[in-house]
Amino acid sequence: MAFVLIGFMGAGKSAAAVELAAALGERSFDTDALLAERFGHSVAAEFELHGEHAFRAAEEQLACELLASARPEEVIALGGGSVLSGRVREALARGHVTVLLEVSAGTAWERVRDDVRAEAQTRPLARERDAFAALHAERAPLYESLADAVLMEHRRGAMERVAPSLRALRKLPAATRLVWAAASPSAGEAGEYPVLAGAGLLAGAGAWLLEAWPPAGARSRAFCVTDERVGPLYAGLLGGLAATATLSPGERSKTLASAERVWQAMVEAGLTRADHVLALGGGVVGDLAGFCAATYQRGVPVVQIPTTLVAQVDSAYGGKTGVDLPQAKNYVGAYHQPAGVLVDPDTLATLPPAELAAGWVEVAKTALIAGGGLWQRVAAGEEVDAAMILACARTKLAVVAEDERDGGRRQVLNLGHTVGHAIETATGYRRYRHGEAVGLGLLAALRLSGQEQLRELARELMLARGLPVALDDDLEQESLEAIISALAKDKKRVGEKVPFVLVRAPGQVEFGCELEPRQVRAAIEELAA
């Protein structure tokens, strides 16, 4: 059926519909333009002459006509308020692919005001900024509930690159969702990539998808990097592989020595820059495989296939790759955006409970950054589901789109990680899972933020999942000093002080906060008390 573009005013639906239709070789329709033709005057004039109720009735009728008669792959751009109609929502559910063009309230306001100035006319629902922002917030959940695909902050010219992934989406199970990650200004097209998420993707469509999906390319061979636990479970679902490099599971494999073994295996397989890497596993595999892809022959594409919760909600996105040194975590690495991400929540069923609990910490961290509905779900103790995983991914992707290389806002994603990484380093990457260490770091960060109620809530939620809320009793004073020493080597350090990420309230997180050493020591000592 048709591809139907929805979203708030100013999202760029009209231009995107023309672009997408051209890429698909089909026709496009714009309900606002067609309504203006029927009225014989502008939409704004119709509001003035007959009121919003009459306009909505005409809009509903036209939208339902178009959706009922659309040919496969035709493109329809609906007006921002069209989906308020129950009839329109029912028509959308009859096999159409609904594509949400996401836009922030601020960006939408600026675009709409520019349109108004250029056309010397008013938009009836864009006359007062606070009311405009309130309407944006009111409609956002409805748009998201209808979307089969989300294009984050769509940029003109991107639809030609998006089109193949939308075509692939039509052939996948109905529950599959597509998120098109937007590029940061510094990354350009290299920072754009598709994320496909849905239960059963690997078992039901893994081999076909990785052959037909745009990141692979017609003649590209796949080289798989996985570990001894994940490989036997899922590598066979990926179709023909040129070769596979298998690591020992766990953080201890995230080393330059392991990277060298992977590079050597790539050479032996005859891998070229026309080929691509599949990173099949958790955060360690994703970071290491991405680093090897970034550096082999100065860069080959990598498709991330995360199989752990921490990877599905966080580490598979954003392009950070690297390995650890004995002195510090993630000290050697490169930014290398994935060519795509394939998320199958069914893979979480094979994880032990402790691993799922550790991954939950990244969900909590992301929810504190996002605030709103995501935090409300986490704070209520709800279990992680596919919708929550995708919400976390979108939160991270939105942050990365603003700042790819940690020059500013991306640093908020380090919430809890500053102390957490120091704990991992000081204990030799053996004592705590990554999520467990970050959980302890999150408690320290909330203490340093002065957020006592939030800290207590986080502590209760962690205890309910069997996560540690204090350092192990048998850690000696030397270990405490080692944590503080490792903290001083944090890779985000600029000058003498390590910047911290602090929480003012859920959804209000600040980066680059400098603290006195005695404050930091006290927060770490409290974890050991």
Image (cartoon, rainbow, N blue to C red):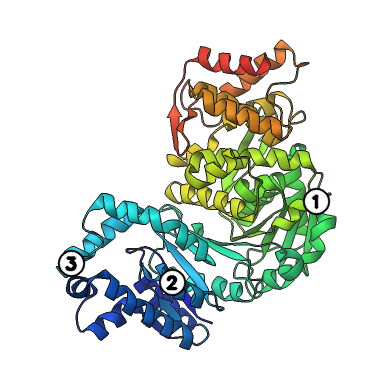
Point out residue 390 in the picture as x, y percentages from the top left corner: 58, 54
Q: Amino acid at mark 2?
A: Leu
Against 102, residue 99 (above or below) is below
* Element carrying mark 3: helix
Q: Nearer the viewer, residue 99 or 232?
A: 99
* Element carrying mark 1: helix
- Mark 3 or 2, which is nearer the eye? 2
* Element carrying mark 2: strand
Quote the CA–CA distance across marks 3 and 2. 24 Å
Q: Which label is found at residue 118? A: 3
- Judge left or right: residue 146 versus residue 333: left
Check disc 1: other Cα within 10 Å, few if <14, some if 14-19, many if 20+: few
Q: Which label is found at residue 350? A: 1
Point out residue 312 in the picture as x, y percentages from the top left corner: 65, 51
Of the image marks 1 and 2, the number of the one nearer the N terminus: 2
- Residue at x-position 59% and y-position 64%: 177
Q: Return the residue at label 2.
A: 5
Q: Nearer the viewer, residue 517 or 386?
A: 386
Of the image marks 3 and 1, the number of the one nearer the N terminus: 3
